[in-house]
C-alpha cells in the first residue's frame, strides 16, 4: 500500500492501492491510524503483510483505535464516502457533493435548486473550494455537453427528466430527495472519471456563478441525449468478439434488472396488503380484550405486538421503495447508455471500414496511396475501442460495488425488520409468563 | 342461593360453593375419570363402507386407547384397551352429554369441516394435516370430558371408551333425544321469562361476545395468513432471477447463485410456519365452540326459570278459580261467570264436583311447581359451579394459546433472520 500526497488536511489525503486491490475497511482504517500517528496493534492480515508500517502495541491507544474505527464505520455509510466505492485505482483530487435542495418561486416558474460543493487540489481550478447552486436543467446541460465533447466515453445517466404532472409531485420531499441522490451520484461518477473530470464544461458547471448556457438547450426534447437517436445496427465486417460479448451481456443484464424491479414492486404490493390485514387483526385482539377481565392484559399485549410489527413492516417497505428501487432503475438507464455507446463504436467501425473499402478500390484502380483520412478513421476507431474497454472495466467494477451495497442493504433491512418483531414478541412472552407464575403462587396460597 | 348476585364468584372459584357443598366437590374431584385411566387417541385410519343410504363412502376412524392409570404407577406394562370410533360417533356422544347434562358446559369437538380456510389450506377432510389436527382435537375432547367432575362418571362415556360393540344402541336406549327442548319453547323463553338470574343473563351476553370475537379473530387470522404466504412466495422469484443472472456474471456469479438458493428456501419456509399456526387456530376454534355451549347452558336456565314461572302462574290462576267457585265471588272474568249471570247459578252438586276436580288440579299444579322449582334450582347450582370452572379453564387455556402464538411468531422471526443473514453472506461474496 502506498500513501502519497499527505497534506496537512487529513480529508484530502489520497490513497492508492495496488491495481485490482479493493479499497477495504482495513486499508482505510490503516490510513487513519497513520495520519494520527498512533502506534496501534494490528490484527494479522495476510493481505497487508507487505507494507504495513506499524507494529508493537500500546494499550493506551486501544480505545482511540476503536473510536476511530467506529467513526469510520459511521462515515462509511454516509453519502459522501459512498464515492470511495466508485474510486478507480488512480489518485483522487476532486471531491463533489450535491445537497441542500431549495424551492425557488418566480413569476414564470417554480423549480428546485441544489447546492453543488467542490473541494479540489487540481490546478485546473483557480480556488480550492467552490459552492454553487444548480438546477436539474443545468445538470442536463452538463450531460449533453459531455456527450458532445467526449463521444467515445460512457457518460453516466441522469435521473428521469420528465415526470407526469398530477401523477408525481415534483416538489414532494421524497421525490426531491430521490432525485438529489441520483444527481449526486451522477456528479461523483463524472468527477471520478479520469477523462471526463478534466472536461472544461464540468469545470464551468462546478465553478461558474451563472452558467452561460445556450438558450436552445432548454428546448431539448425528452430524447435530448443525441446518443439515443443513434439507430440500431450498423453493417460491420466483423465486430470484435469482446464487443459482441459486451452487447450480449448488457441485454441479459438489463432484462434481469427489469425482472428484479418487477419482483420488488410486487413484493411491495403484497406487503401493503399484508399490512392492511395486520392492522385489522390487531384491532380484533383489542376489541376482544374489552370484554375480558383476566385475559384483558394478555390480549392487549398481543394487539400491541402486532401493531409494533405493523410499524416495522411499514419501515421495511418504505426503505425498499426509497432506497432499493431508485438505484435499480438508475442502472437500467445506465445500461441503456452503455448500449448506445456500443452502437456508436459500431458506427465508428463502420465508417472506417467503409472508407477503407473505398480507398482500397481506388488504390486498385489508380495506385494512389492510402489517404490520410482512412488512417485517421482507423485511429479514431481504435481510440474509441480502447476508451470503451477502459470504461467498461470501470463500469463493471462500479456495478459490482453498487449491487453488492444495494443487495446487502436489502438483506440488512429485512434482518432489521425481523429483529424488531422478535424483540416485541419476546417481551410479551416474559409478561405473559410472569402473570402465569403470579397466578400459580396465588393458587397455592 | 350461591349464585344469586354473582359476587360469590370469587369465593366459589376454587370449587367450593357458598352454602357449604364443598364436600360434594371434593368427592367429585376424586371420581375424576382421568385419574383412574389414561386416555389417548392414538391413530387415524381410512375405512370404506356403506353409509345410511347404502352408498359407498370413505371415512376415517380413530383409535382410542385406554389404560388404567395405576398400571404405569405400579410399573406394570399392560396392553391398552382399544376401540375404533369415527367422528359421527363422537358427535353422538356429545349430543347425548349435552341433553343429559344441560347444566354443564360440555367440551367441544374439533370442527366437522375445515372452516376459516386460507387459500393454501385445503378444505378436504381427507387431507392428512387436517386428519392429524382432528385427532388431536378428539383427544382433547376426551381428556376434557374425562376430567370434568360432573361428566366423567357417565356410563355411556365409559362404554364409549372401552367397548366398541352395541354402544350406539345403548345411547339410544337412554332416550336422551326426548330431553331435547323444542326450539320454539327455548326461543320463546328468552323473551318471556320475567326474572331470570342476572348472572346468567350477563353470562349469556358474555358468551355471545366470546363467540363474536373468536370468529372475528379466526377470520382475520386466515386473511393475514393468506397475505404473508403471498409475500414469502413472491421472494421465490428472486431465487430464479438471481440464478439466471449469476450465469452471465464472472465475479458476482457464485454469490448471486447461493443468494438465490437462500431466497428459495425462504419462500418455502412459510408453509411449515403456517401449519404450526393452524394449531393456534384450533385452540381458538375450541373456544368458539365452548362459547356456544356456554350460551346453551344460560338459555337452559332461562327455560327452566320460565317453566317455573309458567307453572307458578298456572297454580295461582287455578287457586283463584277455586276461590271464586267456593266463595261465589267473581273477581276475574270467566265464561262460567257470564253464563251464571245469564242463566243462573248451577246446582250445588255440580259445584262440588267442579271444586274437587279443581282441588285435584291444584294438587297436580303444586307438584309441578315443586318439580320445576327443584329442576330450576338444580340447574342454577350445578350450572353456576360449572360456569366458574369453565371460566378458570378458559383463562388458563387461552393465555397458553397466546403464549403458544407468540412462540410461533418468535420462531418465524428467528428463521427469517437466519435466512436473510445467509443471503447477506452470499451477497458479501459477490
Image (spheres, rainbow, N blue to C red):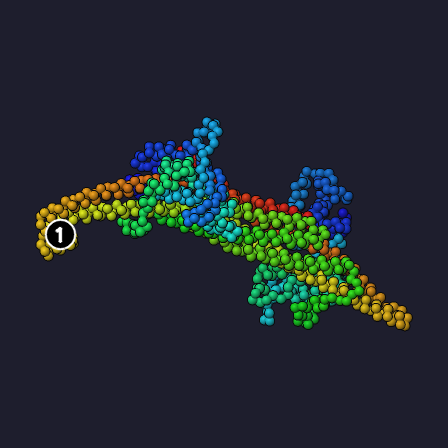
Rendering coords of residue A82 (x, y %): 67, 53
Q: Relative to residue B17, is residue B351 depicted above or below?
A: below
- Give me the chain letter of mark 1: B
Instruction: Indicate left or right for B369 with A338 as reference.
Output: left
Residue at x 74% of width, y 62% of height? A342
Whether residue A125 is visible here, answered yes or no, is no
Write down the quadrant of residue A440 in the picture. Answer: top left
Residue nearest the observer in this picture, A25 or B15 = B15
Rendering coords of residue A197 (x, y %): 74, 60
Label 1 environment density (alpha carbons within 10 Å; few <14, some 14–19, many ≥20):
some
Residue at x 78% of width, y 65% of height? A236
Residue nearest the observer in this picture, B99 or A233 = B99
Q: Secondary structure at mark 1?
A: loop
Write down the quadrant of residue A422 in the picture. Answer: top right
Residue nearest the observer in this picture, A351 or B103 = B103
Residue nearest the observer in this picture, B26 or A405 = B26
Which residue is label 1 attached to?
B330
Amino acid at each position: 500500500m502506498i500513501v502519497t500526497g499527505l497534506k496537512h488536511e487529513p480529508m484530502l489525503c489520497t490513497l492508492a492501492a495496488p491495481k485490482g486491490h479493493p479499497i477495504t475497511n482495513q486499508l482505510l482504517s490503516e490510513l487513519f491510524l497513520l495520519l494520527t500517528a498512533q502506534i496501534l496493534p494490528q490484527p494479522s492480515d495476510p493481505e497487508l503483510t507487505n507494507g504495513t508500517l506499524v507494529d508493537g502495541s500500546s494499550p493506551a491507544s486501544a480505545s482511540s483505535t476503536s473510536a476511530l474505527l467506529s467513526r469510520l464505520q459511521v462515515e462509511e455509510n454516509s453519502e459522501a464516502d459512498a464515492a470511495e466505492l466508485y474510486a478507480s485505482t488512480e489518485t483522487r483530487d476532486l471531491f463533489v457533493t450535491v445537497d441542500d435542495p431549495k424551492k425557488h418561486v418566480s413569476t414564470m416558474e417554480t423549480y428546485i435548486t441544489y447546492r453543488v460543493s467542490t473541494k479540489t487540489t487540481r490546478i485546473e481550478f483557480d480556488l480550492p473550494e467552490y459552492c454553487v447552486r444548480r438546477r436539474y436543467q443545468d445538470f442536463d446541460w452538463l450531460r449533453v455537453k459531455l456527450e458532445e465533447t467526449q463521444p467515445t466515453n460512457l457518460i453516466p445517466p441522469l435521473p428521469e427528466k420528465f415526470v407526469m404532472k398530477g401523477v408525481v409531485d415534483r416538489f414532494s420531499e421524497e421525490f426531491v430527495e430521490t432525485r438529489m441522490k441520483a444527481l449526486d451520484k451522477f456528479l461523483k461518477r463524472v468527477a471520478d472519471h479520469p477523462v471526463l473530470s478534466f472536461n472544461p464544461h464540468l469545470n464551468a458547471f462546478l465553478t461558474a456563478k451563472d452558467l452561460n448556457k445556450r438558450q436552445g438547450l432548454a428546448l431539448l426534447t425528452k430524447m435530448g441525449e443525441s446518443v439515443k437517436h443513434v439507430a440500431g445496427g450498423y453493417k460491420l465486417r466483423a465486430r470484435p468478439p469482446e464487443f459482441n460479448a459486451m452487447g450480449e451481456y448488457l441485454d441479459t443484464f438489463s432484462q434481469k434488472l427489469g425482472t428484479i424491479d418487477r419482483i420488488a414492486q410486487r413484493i411491495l404490493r403484497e406487503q401493503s396488503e399484508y399490512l392492511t390485514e395486520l392492522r385489522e387483526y390487531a384491532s380484533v385482539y383489542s376489541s376482544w380484550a374489552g370484554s375480558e377481565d383476566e385475559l384483558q392484559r394478555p390480549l392487549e399485549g398481543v394487539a400491541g405486538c402486532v401493531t409494533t410489527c405493523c410499524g416495522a413492516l411499514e419501515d421495511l417497505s418504505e426503505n425498499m421503495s426509497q432506497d432499493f428501487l431508485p438505484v435499480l432503475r438508475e442502472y437500467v438507464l445506465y445500461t441503456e447508455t452503455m448500449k448506445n455507446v456500443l452502437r456508436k463504436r459500431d458506427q465508428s467501425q463502420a465508417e472506417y471500414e467503409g472508407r477503407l473499402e473505398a480507398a482500397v478500390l481506388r488504390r486498385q484502380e489508380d495506385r494512389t496511396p492510402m489517404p490520410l483520412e482512412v488512417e485517421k478513421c482507423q485511429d479514431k476507431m481504435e481510440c474509441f475501442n480502447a476508451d470503451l474497454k477502459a470504461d467498461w472495466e470501470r463500469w463493471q467494477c462500479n456495478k459490482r460495488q453498487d449491487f453488492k451495497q444495494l443487495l446487502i442493504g436489502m438483506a440488512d433491512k429485512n434482518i432489521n425488520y425481523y429483529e424488531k418483531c422478535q424483540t416485541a414478541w419476546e417481551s410479551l412472552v416474559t409478561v405473559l409468563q410472569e402473570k402465569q407464575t403470579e397466578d400459580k403462587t396465588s393458587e397455592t396460597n | 342461593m350461591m349464585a344469586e348476585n354473582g359476587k360469590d364468584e370469587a369465593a366459589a372459584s376454587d370449587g367450593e360453593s357458598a352454602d357449604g357443598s364443598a364436600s360434594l366437590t371434593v368427592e367429585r374431584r376424586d371420581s375424576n375419570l382421568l385419574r383412574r385411566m389414561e386416555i389417548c387417541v392414538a391413530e387415524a385410519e381410512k375405512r370404506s363402507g356403506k353409509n345410511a343410504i347404502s352408498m359407498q363412502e370413505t371415512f376415517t376412524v380413530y383409535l382410542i386407547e385406554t389404560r388404567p392409570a395405576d398400571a404405569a404407577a405400579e410399573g406394570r406394562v399392560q396392553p391398552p384397551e382399544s376401540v375404533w370410533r369415527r367422528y359421527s360417533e363422537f358427535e353422538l356422544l356429545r349430543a347425548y352429554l349435552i341433553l343429559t347434562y344441560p347444566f354443564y358446559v360440555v367440551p367441544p369437538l374439533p370442527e366437522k369441516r375445515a372452516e376459516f380456510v386460507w387459500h393454501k389450506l385445503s378444505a378436504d377432510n381427507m387431507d392428512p394435516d387436517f386428519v392429524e389436527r382432528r385427532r388431536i382435537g378428539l383427544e382433547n375432547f376426551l381428556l376434557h370430558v374425562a376430567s370434568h367432575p360432573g361428566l366423567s362418571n357417565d356410563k355411556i362415556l365409559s362404554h364409549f371408551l372401552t367397548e366398541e360393540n352395541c354402544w350406539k344402541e345403548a345411547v339410544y336406549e337412554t332416550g336422551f333425544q326426548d330431553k331435547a327442548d323444542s326450539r320454539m319453547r327455548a326461543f320463546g323463553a328468552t323473551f318471556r321469562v320475567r326474572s331470570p338470574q342476572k348472572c346468567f343473563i350477563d353470562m349469556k351476553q358474555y358468551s355471545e361476545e366470546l363467540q363474536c370475537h373468536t370468529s372475528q379473530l379466526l377470520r382475520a387470522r386466515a386473511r393475514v395468513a393468506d397475505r404473508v404466504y403471498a409475500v414469502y412466495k413472491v421472494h421465490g422469484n428472486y431465487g430464479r432471477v438471481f440464478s439466471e443472472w449469476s450465469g452471465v456474471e464472472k465475479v458476482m456469479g457464485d454469490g448471486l447463485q447461493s443468494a438465490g438458493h437462500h431466497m428459495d428456501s425462504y419462500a418455502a419456509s412459510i408453509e411449515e410456519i403456517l401449519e404450526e399456526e393452524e394449531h393456534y387456530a384450533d385452540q381458538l376454534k375450541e373456544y368458539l365452540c365452548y362459547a356456544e355451549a356456554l350460551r346453551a347452558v344460560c338459555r337452559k336456565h332461562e327455560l327452566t326459570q320460565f317453566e317455573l314461572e309458567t307453572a307458578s302462574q298456572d297454580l295461582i290462576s287455578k287457586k283463584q278459580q277455586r276461590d271464586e267457585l267456593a266463595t261465589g265471588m267473581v273477581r276475574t272474568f270467566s265464561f262460567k261467570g257470564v253464563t251464571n249471570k245469564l242463566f243462573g247459578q248451577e246446582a250445588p252438586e255440580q259445584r262440588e264436583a267442579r271444586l274437587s276436580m279443581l282441588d285435584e288440579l291444584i294438587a297436580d299444579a303444586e307438584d309441578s311447581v315443586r318439580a320445576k322449582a327443584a329442576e330450576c334450582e338444580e340447574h342454577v347450582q350445578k350450572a353456576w359451579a360449572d360456569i366458574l370452572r369453565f371460566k378458570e379453564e378458559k383463562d388458563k387455556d387461552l393465555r397458553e394459546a397466546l403464549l403458544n402464538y407468540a412462540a410461533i411468531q418468535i420462531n418465524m422471526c428467528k428463521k427469517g433472520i437466519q435466512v436473510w443473514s445467509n443471503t447477506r453472506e452470499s451477497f458479501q461474496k459477490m
